Image: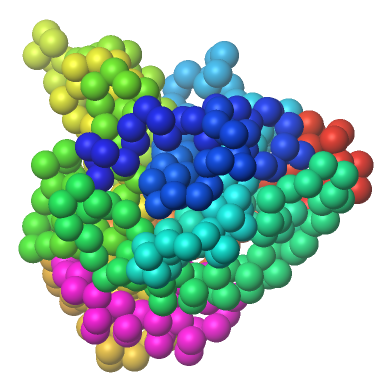
């Protein structure tokens, strides 16, 4: 998939979008009446939706800013000037509705939603092979749901647009719960339509397991733990995932789309505009990669201290020092999961891992609540990290212990902020961060959208 999915013609459906949210229908360089007719047209269209996930406002930068930097896991680093100031404000809950990073997350997320809406609107009457039609429908539903999940968790009350936008339509906000309930419907259909796996160049596309994993996460967020348990047991029993024996083998270009991976946003280097920026963004120095190191998404001291002695995940996930070109040891906390060997600055081949099997095991423990089985699930993840078992006698509440295990296992993978919200732990956890004087659970809707849609209200 890395080699064929993001070919340059993917941009045909994306580059024509205006910057206004109200332009919810993508404008193709081709005549739309002639375009959505053949199988290859829908393949191009769904590939454009996958490509949209790469964008700066989504997995390129927006989502890790909203879900990692917003939490206690990471901060902007020592630089708080220029562009970095926008990240610092997000980290400290002092950003306003004009913050460009949050605006980009909003607009680019709805751009992907718009593209999926057109596919879902155009494909039903077209005569296509049934298997292909079902698969593309499932892919579009999954991608749209993935974006809507982030938007609902991040912004709360947002417009729920499920059809191509028509000029003159009024956009109506709905609450977070309404969005999530719609995702249950959409992801159930997506899971039914998608294959268990792919082969060859299609590896990396959305599968039943990807749809089911997001479905379980949505159900847990809604408090439907019993339903989530059913879905999670289906993933474990039917879809063929497994924990890799070595945590280090999850990371790096050579290990992408492995047996533990459920869904990754695919990036490809080569100077064609499809490479990722994580290596440069997260590295603190040019000694660690080609080009600049910006030191963004820097692990906090509390993140560093969260790892137990002997935890094999620590050195793989983050570093507290590095050796510079002069051979000196330099103190600088930084994320290691996304380091790669770059030929061109900001053009890494490294993917972003969205869902993996360890998350499924920990979510099942959450769905079950405290029990011997839930501790067995947690310990399966801990033992892989070289740590001993925990049980009901281990100090702390079950929720605190599970939240801790999720933090260190899934660090820097965009799960921490949703976890804190789902566990009701935002204030409890973040009050310990001395740079935060106040917290809130939602980002401001960008001022531009308020100006365009005067019926919108901030959360």
Report the predominant secondary structure element of the magenta stretch. helix
**Residue extent of the magenta highlight:** 214-243
Q: How many marks?
A: 0
Query: Is residue 186 shown left or right of residue 231?
Result: right
Query: Is residue 350 shown left or right of residue 457?
Result: left
Q: Residue at x 50, y 50 (%)?
A: 37
Q: From the top left corner, tell me how far across and down residue 428 is, in percent.
A: 57, 61
Is 95 in front, or is 177? Answer: 177
Q: Is residue 433 visible?
A: no
Quadrant of the snapshot with the N terminus? top left
Q: Pick out the residue farthest to the right.
A: 454
Q: Residue at x 32, y 21 (%)?
A: 272
Q: Which corner quadrant of the image does residue 78 belong to?
A: top left
* Residue 226 shown in magenta: yes
From this view, report whether residue 439 is shown above or below residue 332: below
Query: Is residue 315 shown left or right of residue 220?
Result: left
Q: Residue at x 37, y 28 (%)?
A: 8
Q: From the top left corner, tell me how far across and down residue 223 is, in percent.
A: 57, 80
Q: Is residue 157 visible?
A: yes
From this view, report whether residue 451 is shown above or below residue 39: above
From this view, report whether residue 19 is shown above or below residue 38: above
Q: From the top left corner, tell me how far across and down residue 399 is, in percent.
A: 44, 75
From this view, report whether residue 272 is shown above or below residue 117: above
Q: How is the image coloured?
A: rainbow
Is 301 in front, or is 287? Answer: 287
* Residue 364 shown in magenta: no
Q: Residue at x 55, y 31 (%)?
A: 30
Q: From the top left corner, tell me how far across and down residue 410 is, in percent.
A: 33, 56
Is 389 in front, or is 36? Answer: 36
């Amino acid at each position: 998939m890395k080699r064929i999915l993001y070919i340059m013609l993917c941009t045909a459906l994306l580059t024509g979008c205006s910057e206004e949210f109200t332009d919810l229908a993508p404008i193709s360089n081709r005549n739309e009446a002639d375009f959505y007719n053949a199988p290859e047209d829908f393949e191009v269209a769904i590939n454009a939706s996958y490509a949209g996930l790469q964008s700066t406002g989504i997995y390129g930068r927006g989502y890790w800013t909203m879900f990692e930097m917003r939490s206690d896991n990471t901060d902007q680093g020592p630089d708080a000037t220029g562009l970095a100031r926008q990240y610092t404000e997000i980290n400290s809950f002092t950003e306003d509705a004009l913050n460009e990073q949050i605006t980009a997350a909003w607009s680019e997320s709805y751009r992907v939603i718009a593209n999926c809406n057109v596919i879902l609107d155009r494909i039903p009457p077209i005569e296509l092979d049934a298997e292909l039609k079902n698969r593309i429908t499932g892919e579009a539903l999954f991608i749209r749901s993935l974006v809507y999940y982030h938007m609902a968790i991040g912004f709360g009350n947002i417009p729920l647009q499920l059809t191509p936008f028509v000029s003159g339509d009024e956009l109506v906000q709905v609450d977070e719960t309404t969005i999530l309930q719609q995702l249950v419907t959409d992801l159930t259909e997506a899971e039914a339509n998608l294959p268990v796996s792919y082969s060859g160049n299609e590896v990396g596309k959305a599968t039943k397991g990807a749809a089911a994993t997001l479905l379980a996460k949505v159900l847990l967020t809604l408090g439907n733990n019993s339903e989530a348990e059913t879905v999670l047991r289906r993933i474990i029993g039917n879809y063929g995932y497994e924990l890799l024996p070595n945590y280090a083998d999850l990371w790096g270009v050579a290990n992408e789309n492995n047996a533990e991976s459920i869904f990754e946003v695919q990036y490809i280097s080569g100077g064609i505009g499809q490479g990722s920026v994580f290596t440069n963004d997260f590295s603190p120095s040019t000694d660690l990669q080609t080009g600049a190191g910006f030191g963004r998404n820097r692990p906090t001291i509390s993140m560093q201290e969260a790892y137990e002695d002997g935890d094999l995940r620590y050195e793989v996930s983050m570093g507290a020092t590095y050796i510079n070109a002069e051979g000196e040891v330099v103190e600088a906390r930084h994320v290691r999961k996304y380091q790669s060997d770059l030929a061109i600055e900001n053009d890494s081949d490294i993917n972003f891992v969205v869902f993996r099997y360890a998350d499924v095991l920990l979510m099942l423990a959450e769905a079950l609540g405290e029990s011997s089985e839930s501790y067995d699930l947690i310990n399966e993840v801990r033992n892989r990290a070289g740590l001993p078992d925990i049980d009901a006698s281990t100090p702390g509440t079950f929720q605190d212990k599970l939240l801790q295990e999720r933090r260190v296992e899934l660090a820097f993978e965009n799960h921490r902020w949703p976890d804190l919200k789902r566990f009701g732990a935002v204030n409890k956890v973040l009050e310990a961060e001395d740079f935060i004087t106040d917290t809130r659970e939602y980002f401001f809707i960008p001022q531009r959208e308020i100006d365009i849609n005067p019926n919108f209200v901030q959360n």
